[in-house]
Image (spheres, coloured by chain):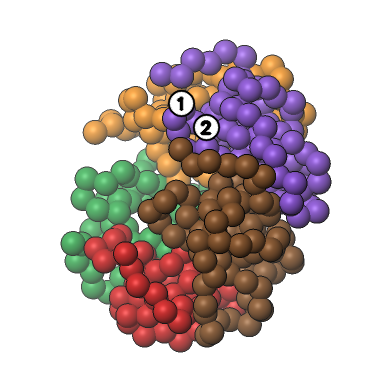
Chain colours: A purple, B brown, C red, D orange, E green
Amino acid sequence: MKIMRVEKTLVSTNRIGELGHRPLLVVTDKPGGTPQVAVDAIGCIPGDWVICVGSSAAREAAGSKSYPSDLTIVGIIDQWSAE
Amino acid sequence: MKIMRVEKTLVSTNRIGELGHRPLLVVTDKPGGTPQVAVDAIGCIPGDWVICVGSSAAREAAGSKSYPSDLTIVGIIDQWSAE
Amino acid sequence: MKIMRVEKTLVSTNRIGELGHRPLLVVTDKPGGTPQVAVDAIGCIPGDWVICVGSSAAREAAGSKSYPSDLTIVGIIDQWSAE
Amino acid sequence: MKIMRVEKTLVSTNRIGELGHRPLLVVTDKPGGTPQVAVDAIGCIPGDWVICVGSSAAREAAGSKSYPSDLTIVGIIDQWSAE
Amino acid sequence: MKIMRVEKTLVSTNRIGELGHRPLLVVTDKPGGTPQVAVDAIGCIPGDWVICVGSSAAREAAGSKSYPSDLTIVGIIDQWSAE
């Protein structure tokens, strides 16, 4: 799993129905890093350092085997400092 | 999921039958970035910033479990500026 | 999916039975790029620019769910110029 | 599989239920490398060099097909020196 | 699939039972490249250039759908010279 920081919520009005209304968050692996989009299965706020699972495990972690996610937030890290 | 920009439509007359007639789009993660090919499940136009799902989730997002996609556009981002 | 160029056929006499006799091609994403091996599901010749699907979709695209491929050529691009 | 070194335990109190209480470890591929998070299926201690399996194989290696892992430690290497 | 060179056997006494006794080999994509670990489904020796399959296809190529591999050697290349 990857260690990422939550930057902000991503607004995408025009999306496929399978995504439902789950929040999509912009995450980066370090300040200035390439932003990616993760499905929030926990309830995070910007600034949180989180654990993101990818690969096929991201689907079930997002709630169901058919959920179209390849990156899902599965935990908030209690303490983390980027180096 | 990755944040990509739609560049143009990709024409591939000679393709396997499983791809059907779904539009294939050239996308990049930044200006001058390596172009990739994504299946359009939404209806995008060049210039749109979109959310692309990869891994095994790309198949079902493209319409069925047996669709041969590893990158599918699942949403258009309302507002995005590349930095 | 990735955009790759077919370089040549790869000869591997000693291979697992599941690979069968499908042609294996050496492909690169750009001149001088790292060569990879793709299963040809179309019928390509060296110099063709092709669409390669990876991840779990590569298996079914190669003909069956149990085919051991992680990179399968699913289409030939009508026109492409590497930049 | 990847060769990684165990750095420390990762504490994440707020996590999805599917992760259970399996230990999560911070691993790196080299000193100063990007830290990642792996599920420990063996019983490791900091300093161990380990074999980490990714992709969909990480799920079953962690104990069940529905376990949300994309990186699982499946073996401790008897002797390894990073170069 | 990736083109890799077999470096040596990897000894891991403490491993999960699902790995069984299949040989684990250290492979690199080029001299000095990052070493990875592959399951040998062929019977290779150090110095062989081999075809490695990753993703979910690595599991079945290693012998069964539940085998915890994400990189399996599926063929030996007859002739290869690294450039």
Q: Which quadrant of the figure has residue B40?
A: bottom right
Identify whether B22 is placed above or below E16.
below
**The label number, if any, that marks residue C83 in the structure image:** none
Residue B8 appears left or right of D3: right
Q: Is residue C48 above or below residue E2?
A: below
Query: Callout 2: few (<14), some (14-19), or many (20+) C-alpha neighbours within 10 Å?
Result: many
Whether residue B67 sits left or right of residue A83 in the image: it is: right
* Cβ–Cβ under 8 Å for marks 1 and 2: yes
What element does badge 1 sit on? loop
Whether residue E46 appears in this view of the structure is no
Pick the front one: B76 or E6: B76
**Residue in the foreground of this view, choosing between C65 and A22:** A22
Q: Is residue B71 visible?
A: yes
- Can you give x and y, in whole percent of width and height, for residue D24 in the image? 59, 25
- Whole-angstrom CA distance, mark 1 to mark 2, is 7 Å
Q: Could you say where residue D41 lies in the image, as x and y percent from the top left? A: 59, 33
Q: Amino acid at mark 1?
A: Pro
Judging from the image, mark 1 belongs to the subunit labelled A
Please name the residue that numbered disc 1 is placed on. A31
Under circle 2, the secondary element is: strand
Residue for point 66% across, 78% down: B21
The residue identified by callout 2 is A28
- Judge whether D35 appears above or below C54 on screen: above
Q: Determine the image quadrant of residue C78.
A: bottom left
Dot 1 crowding, Cα within 10 Å, few <14, some 14–19, many 20+: few
User: Is circle 1 on the same chain as circle 2?
Assistant: yes
Q: Position of residue D47 (x, y in %)?
A: 40, 21
Instruction: Please give the name of the residue rendered at 69% of the width and 63% of the height, measured from the top-left corner.
Output: B43
